[in-house]
Image (cartoon, grey):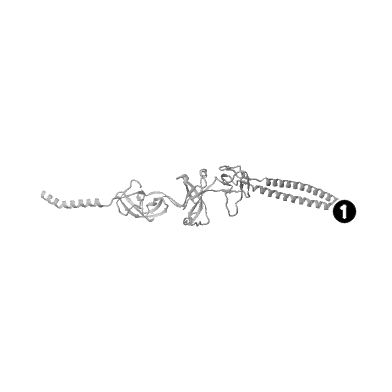
Amino acid sequence: MNRTVRKLFRWILPFIVIAAVGFLIWQTTRPDPVEVVVRPVQNGQVEKIVANTRAGTVEACRRAKLSPSIGGQIARLPVKKGDRVSAGQLLLELWNEDLAAQTDLAESEAASAKSRAVAACLQAEEAKREADRLIKLRKTGAASEEQTDRSVTRAKSLEADCQASRTSIRTSRARVGVARANLARTRLTAPFTGVIAEITGELSEYVTPSPIGIATPPAVDLIDTSCFYVKAPIDEVDAAAVSVDLPARITLDAFGDRRFSGHVRRIADYVLDREKQARTVDVEVEFTQTEDFQRLLAGYSADVEIILDARVDTLRIPTQALLDGRRVFVFSPNQSRIQERSVQTGLSNWEFTEVTSGLQAEELVVVNVDRPGISDGVHAVIMKEIP
């Protein structure tokens, strides 16, 4: 029996040695496992969005760059930068004593014309009563025809004087209106409630209106801080899918990761074609919450994400795990291998993609698909930290 065992052992031993050597060679020559970063397939929200191609800008709903319509010397400047003013409040006044005197003169002339008209019309009324009385007496023979005709003619003449005086009143009032309009041209008032952003000029300095075709700085820059929106350029390819009232998210560099809610309020009626830049369409996105206006400043840079469609509770994977829009690598913890798999997708953005078939919840997909060595069937281990 021992002889049989020894004989069997002599036959088996070479195979054991060969297998051990082969296993050793395989262990020393096989490639190291590929380190992968994985994410589980989970349910969540996926949105189809459109974003701006270049940074947008926070704009005030109303902003007026004001200047007097005539030139002159600044006589009054009752406001300064940063002041909050009300609609109709005086912002700047040019020297206008001559125009003020002309206005006073026109108003005095108008008052005088009114008094003359009152006197003329009273005389006309008296003459008419006298003429009516003589006409009655003429019928009874108590008044002569000549006396009656003279009285009627005089009444008509005074009535004409009355009408001319009334016309003179309207003329005088028109002169007052012209004088007041000329005086108003020297005064700059706030067209709406807002904050003074800039003032160009000081007391006693001269301001001149902007010549045709030549832009000059406004005397007063007034901003309405009660309403803001973002104007951002959208690629012409994406603009066709955008419509008014679509929901949107707004991010501003000044507020870090904070997101503001908004909606599309206007889409430009034309495409911008700027040299060396893609053709874009300006889209205006209005802030939804009025309390957000308290900390906003016109001119902030901003980005917008316009939500075209959304799935609230759907199977999703990180978009970076998707290859060619239809393939993923799935990591199997039991086999420590990755396998290529075809999938069907739905809505997608740069963060998540909806998966309609090909994957199940909690499966692990590889997200560092650009790592060298990743291919179907290779041995892999999960990377502890993302490089």
Where is residue 255? Give x, y as percent. Answer: 47, 44
Where is residue 147? Give x, y as percent. Answer: 87, 52
Q: Is residue 337 above or below residue 295?
A: below
In-image side of 314 versus 100 (left or right): left
Where is residue 283? Give x, y as percent. Answer: 50, 53
Out of 311 and 23, give the one closest to the viewer. Answer: 23
Out of 230 and 181, give the one closest to the viewer. Answer: 181
In-image side of 288 versus 74 (left or right): left
- Identified by mark 1, the residue type is Glu
| Residue 56 seen from this side | yes
Element carrying mark 1? helix
Residue highlighted by disc 1: 146
| Residue 1 seen from this side | no
Out of 351 and 43, give the one closest to the viewer. Answer: 351
In-image side of 40 versus 244 (left or right): left
Q: In percent of the image, x 16 and y 51: which residue is there?
A: 13
How many numbered marks have been drawn onto this rendered protein structure?
1
Q: Residues within 10 Å of mark 1 (few under 14, many from 20)?
A: few
Out of 79 and 11, give the one closest to the viewer. Answer: 79
Where is residue 162? Give x, y as percent. Answer: 77, 50
